[in-house]
Amino acid sequence: MLGYKYKITAAGRINIIGEHIDYCGGKVLPAALSLKNTVYIRPNGTDKINISWTTLPDTVCLDINRLGSYTGLKYGNYQAGSAFVWQRAGHKIIGCDMLQDCSVPFGSGLSSSAAIEVSTIAALAAVANEEFDRVDVALKAQQAEREYMGVNCGIMDQYASACGKKDNAILLDCKTLERQYIPVSLNGYSLVIINSKKPHALASSKYNERRAETEEALKILQKHVKIDCLADMSPDEFERWCGVLGGTIRNRARHVVSECERVRLAAAAMKAGNMEELGALLNQSHESLSKLYEVTGSEVDALVHAAQIHPACAGSRMTGGGFGGCTISLVETAAAEDFKSFVLKKYERETGYMAECYDADISDGITVKEL
């Protein structure tokens, strides 16, 4: 982009399996996507951060001495929060012009917010000539989401956005932040992403409520079992102690414990190239998210059901925070186009929404290029 000094990108992400367990200390299996937020940035010699967008006519001017005061912005609040948290951690913020270009669909469950936060922090570091650690950037981006935006999220989205690796999924332990890259080799299958086009807004949804429910379950169980987080419990151990939990709280915790087990099995299936097993686990994950965790909604359930009944589909599930957004399906590559046509038509007939398929590759996380 003419006139800018750096081009920085951070990725949206797909979560193959492991939903709503990152904030419970579980292991998750996300991958960074070629759908990205790109930031073009240059120093401007002032004490202002000027933000513009390729997709909006708006411009925003942030005073670097008042970065904590922009939570009410309609546009630019994610950037302001990211800058504020980065500055608060002791990093230098310099005046700059920033052009943001996001190809991650908003409200889709593919973590456009994480991509914006991570790329903004990396861009601010680059323009200030600071080295940065990708995991540290992810943690600061998570803080921005939680403290500035009010969404009590786990670390998965920001971590995948920052630390993704081309053609690999990340088996991420959200308790220790240890990661293992697993090559995505699907043996004649493809991952198909479909947006239900039912928008979701995590801050105004029941996302924070679900987190509070799992925290309540943990406190009750800790009176009986020595665990640091729900993910520490095995399925057998949970069955021994679940009677101490009330019905709704028990369902929330049962999802977390069973989903953690599904991630373990899914990682093994992916390594072994067992796509039937992986697909079955995707189906089980969605059933749990729908019935036990209650975060899917009728539209997403209809989209997943349409996918699951197609003969070329090994499995399908909601991905992301829920209450709308996207699904991910494991589909025989040779029949992928027929699958998409079938699912889109059936879904529109049943819900009235026109869903959209995304062609996205598994890509790297943060990239920095000097222009």
Image: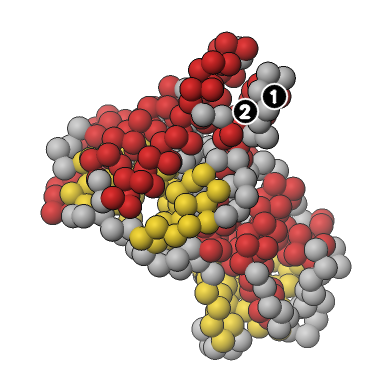
- Residue positioned 47% across, 52% down in the render: 171
Q: Where does residue 37 sit, x and y in percent of width and height?
A: 52, 65
| Residue 340 in view, yes or no | no
Q: Where does residue 332 sit, x and y in percent of width and height?
A: 18, 49
- Residue positioned 40% across, 67% down in the render: 166
Kind of residue indicated by mark 1: Gln
Kind of residue indicated by mark 2: Thr
Q: Is residue 200 above or below residue 99?
A: above
Q: Where does residue 270 sit, x and y in percent of width and height?
A: 32, 50
Few, some or many residues within 10 Å of mark 1 (<14, 14–19, 20+): few
Disc 1 on helix, strand or loop?
Answer: loop
Mark 2 lies on residue: 214
Q: Where does residue 89 sit, x and y in percent of width and height?
A: 80, 63
- Residue positioned 48% across, 22% down in the render: 236
- Of badges 1 and 2, nearer the viewer stands 1
The image quadrant of residue 205 is top right
Q: Is residue 201 left or right of residue 319?
A: right
Mark 1 lies on residue: 222
The quarter in which the C terminus is drawn is: bottom right
| Residue 236 in view, yes or no | yes
Question: Along the polypeptide, which appears first: circle 1 or circle 2?
Answer: 2
Q: Nearer the viewer, residue 9 or 105?
A: 9
Q: Is residue 281 left or right of residue 160?
A: left
Disc 2 on helix, strand or loop?
Answer: helix
